[in-house]
Image: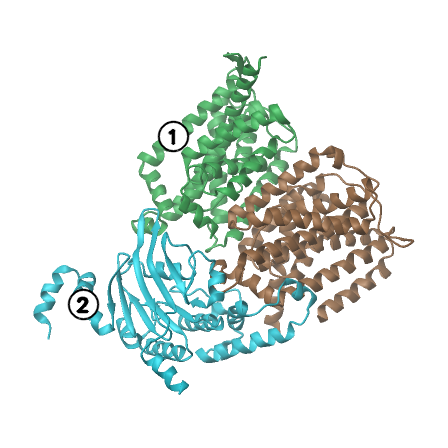
Chain colours: A green, B cyan, C brown
Amino acid sequence: MTLGDQLLQYLFTGITIGAIYGMVALGFNIIYSSTGIINLAQGEFVMLGGMTMIYLTTIIKLPMVVGFFLSILIVTLIGAAFERGAIHPLKSPSVITLIIITVAASILFKGGAMFTWGKHTYSLPPFSGEEPVRILGATILPQALWILGTMAATVVFLILFFGFTLTGKAMRACAANRTAASLVGINVKTMVLLSFALSAGIGAAAGIIITPITLMDYNRGAMLAVKGFSVAVLGGLGSNVGAVVAGFIIGIMESLGAGFISSGYKDAIALVVLLLVLFLKPSGLLGSRERGEFKKF
Amino acid sequence: MRQLLVWLRKRYNIMDPILQVEKLEKNFGGVLAVDGVDFEMNPHQIKAIIGPNGAGKTTIFNLICGIYPPTSGTIRLKQHKINGLKPCVIAEKGISRTFQNVQVFENMSVLENVMVGRHCRTRSELFAAIMHLGTRAEEKGIRDYSLEMLSFVGLEAKKNEAASNLTFQQQKLLEFARALATEPNLFLLDEPAAGLSVPEANEMAQLIYRIRDMGITILLVEHDMELVMEVSDRVIVLSSGQVIAEGTSRQVQNNEAVIAVYLGEREIENADHTKP
Amino acid sequence: MIALITLAGAIMVIPLGLGDSYYLNVLIFVGIYSLITIGLSLLMGYAGQISLGHAAFFGLGAYTSGILSTKFGISPWFALLAAIFVTGGIAFLIGAPALKLKGHYLAMATLAFGYIVFIVFNQVSSLTGGPSGFGEIPRFRLGSFLFKTDVHYYYLVWSLVIVALLISLNITHSRVGRALRSIHGGELTANIMGVNTAKYKIQIFVLSAVYASVAGSLYAHFITFLNPSPFDFHFSIVLVTMVVIGGMASVWGAMIGAALLTLLPQYLRVFHDYDILIYGFTLLVIMIFLPQGLFAAIIGLVKKKI
């Protein structure tokens, strides 16, 4: 393989993994925009999506399509239950409280998954075969195309939802100004519930489509959450465009780093990027300076 | 003879201004909250900034005490530039304030709140704390001074109460005690009468006088016109980030531009006809 | 102060009843973990900051101490001292920029830092031995006296815990302690009232890292071998759980939390793998219903009865 081909290969891998990180980041953004909460359990939704799909299709042997939507639905309900059980009862929680609660929830989800499915690593059959597709000297798995396609579909869905539906606009209103939104009759509590549910659903979808390539186990959520958060911050918390772009950036950086430098340090790349962004420009690439300043105080 | 000179200078305000604000501007990403504000304060003066909501009054306070830097312009305390300094440094230099929405430390007692005010006037640090070296005298000093400040505002009976258990008015007084504990030269009061009943507002006016008698210069932001009129030597009127009038309370009351800004243009025509 | 003396007395007496048994061993771990949680409670409870990566400082203390004494033949005492400087220095470097961040950002920065350190432990095999680690770490010695048995170590560890408690109590009852609590009460307001919040946050962050470093060194010279797995994100969460359960704003609570979460799993052996479920559940329940922690809640109950 020539250097150019290698580069292209890493690029493809990077874009693929970047799409997943981007979807996790979108999940962070949705909850953050509507509530100001950063849901550290986001990664677990991804894990649960994959695991549920595995269970439904390989144990219960449901058809893939049914399994896909059913898994998303189940995890969405879990997300909603989480909001009702752990977030809703809080009365003006401090930041520390919220952080610890979302961390506790992520631990619970992880523990629950371990309890239900054990510590094994599971896999799913790829959606449309295993024959790699040759593009310009590098190969890309068909599953990767599914990943990119799902991400594109998610982005389109979110644009349509937030841009053109009443509910979506209501959620944006909550994000912009909670008090004003409630004054015009928007049920803020319901919007919060919806944002958690939506985030969970998107996370689940990401988990399902990635499992055929990267496999899935009960412990996968934490690292995904941190990397997804890195992407969200890099793109600018709250900016969906930023999440997509930053996802690709970090995915490619990780891929190149793993290929050219060392695969052992691969995970550290996203983490170092996160620290750099937080220390140097917390508002991220596409966030505004002011919002960044407010974060400091 | 010396007494006479001091009295003369005080009487005729012949002293270097304690606060000088020059061409102050603050732009919040497109919103020009403060647009070229100039004013000065002389020692022992009580000055009020009034104006409709959103005029930029609290922004000016926030700029003076260093919460964010001005976009341009300078703020001088006793001739030294203070814009760009951190709030804790500005506090040490002699500016303190109260807050419109009371911000006491709810996780501490009343006395402890005031003792925090003494922080910038005391010195023992982490090493001394760990080693428990020579801190006893300083702690006693902090405690005594804080109790004095609590007496000054009338809260000494509540000294061991949790700050969160006080009434709104009591919390306002606590903020005063805490700010006074920092030994300020310049005291910024952000809507001291807000949320107070008429008798409580009168007590507030008395308190403000007593603070001035301690030798402290006072700048207040206020909506309660009676308090402003009673207590202030001079008044600045702010609208849309700009100073539209400055003078004694009487002068400002009769200023057409001021009336226009509060009541709207058309009212002026009506007002002219009904004025005694 | 009385409480401290009582505790010291109790501690001195316990081994006489237990001898060189298994429980003494567990109590040593309670002591080591208490060292970390006491420091962490100063950071989280008093100053109101959060660290989701404190296992990293524990590990840095352990590895620095272990490596210096094994590969460079330095006496464990000096190695412990050196580890304090290394860990403290790293804490300063990461804390100075990180503590400018608020809330979630700070939490994620500490989380990321913890993970990075863990990855480094695993990767720099020439120094750390990689995932399998290294062994033959020398024990502490004073002259010809070797800290070999559990009894020796018990007294060593708990003496240090008492010192740590003394230091922490001194801090909390001081001007600095008040400044820390004012930061927790309202950082911007504290700043405006003259408290240099940045300085104190960094100081207490570094101090809590130093506590963890000492604990790490004690750990290394006790177990005499090291690998990265105890110093992972899971343990950072366990530490936070200990502090939260005991009561964030209380150094006594921190000790109780450490004791509870070290002793209980011994009795609930059957739950070993599911400890993580229990931690998560407990954290959740406490944060929702008893955010001031068990210690404060019990004190509150006791006060009501009196």
Horizontally, residue A102 falls left or right of residue C60, namely left
Which residue is found at the position 37% from the left and 83% from the top? Answer: B5
Which residue type carries mark 1?
Phe
Vertical position of residue A255 compared to residue C130: above or below: above
Q: Position of residue B35 (x, y in %)?
A: 29, 55
Q: Which residue is mark 2?
A: B255
B71 or A262: nearer the eye? B71
Which residue is found at the position 52% from the left and 75% from the top? Answer: B146
Where's the N terminus of chain A, which quadrant? top right
Q: Position of residue B214 (x, y in %)?
A: 42, 79
Among the 4 quarters of the image, the one containing residue B270: bottom left
Among the 4 quarters of the image, the one containing residue C145: bottom right
Q: Secondary structure at mark 1?
A: helix
Horizontally, residue B148 falls left or right of residue B130, namely left
Q: Which residue is mark 1?
A: A157
Q: Secondary structure at mark 2?
A: loop
Q: Residue furthest bottom?
A: B1
Specify few, some or many for label 1: CA neighbours under 10 Å numbering under 14, 14-19, or 20 or more.
few
B68 or A67: nearer the eye? B68
